[in-house]
Image (cartoon, rainbow, N blue to C red):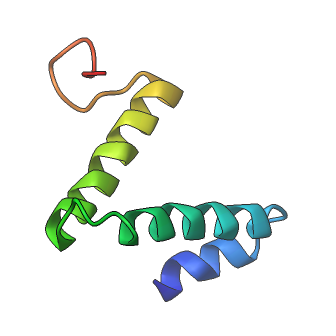
Amino acid sequence: MNYMLDKINVLENKEAILKGAEEIVTSLLENDKLDKSEKLMTIELAMAQLNYKLYNISGDSKEEMPK
């Protein structure tokens, strides 16, 4: 985690990044419907979906990501 914080701390918009990350983590930790591994899987899926929406790169051979 220190590696990521070192990268973020030099950015002009670091406070917004840290706040956004904290909101995501808090939301997942408060979700009682998911166990720990499902919470991590949720983050991985969210990253893949965001990557696709921002850059249209899915990382697989399918044309579309599921909605």
Could you say which quadrant of the image residue 39 lies in? bottom left
Does residue 12 lie above or below 45 as drawn?
Answer: below
Q: Position of residue 33 (x, y in %)?
A: 22, 59
The residue positioned farthest toward the right in the image shown: 12
Question: Which quadrant is the N terminus positioned in?
Answer: bottom left
Q: Position of residue 32 (x, y in %)?
A: 27, 66
Q: Is residue 64 left or right of residue 7?
A: left
Q: Position of residue 35 (x, y in %)?
A: 17, 68
Q: Position of residue 61 (x, y in %)?
A: 15, 20
Q: Is residue 18 left or right of residue 2?
A: right
The residue positioned farthest toward the front in the image shown: 32
The residue positioned farthest toward the bottom in the image shown: 2
At horizontal 45% and vertical 37% (from top left) the residue drawn is: 50
Q: Is residue 15 left or right of residue 63?
A: right
At horizontal 72% and vertical 78% (from top left) the residue drawn is: 9
Callout count: 0
Question: Which quadrant is the C terminus positioned in?
Answer: top left
Q: Is residue 45 left or right of residue 10?
A: left
At horizontal 66% and vertical 70% (from top left) the residue drawn is: 18
At horizontal 62% and vertical 82% (from top left) the residue drawn is: 6
Does residue 66 lie above or below 43 as drawn?
Answer: above
Could you say which quadrant of the image residue 23 lies in? bottom right
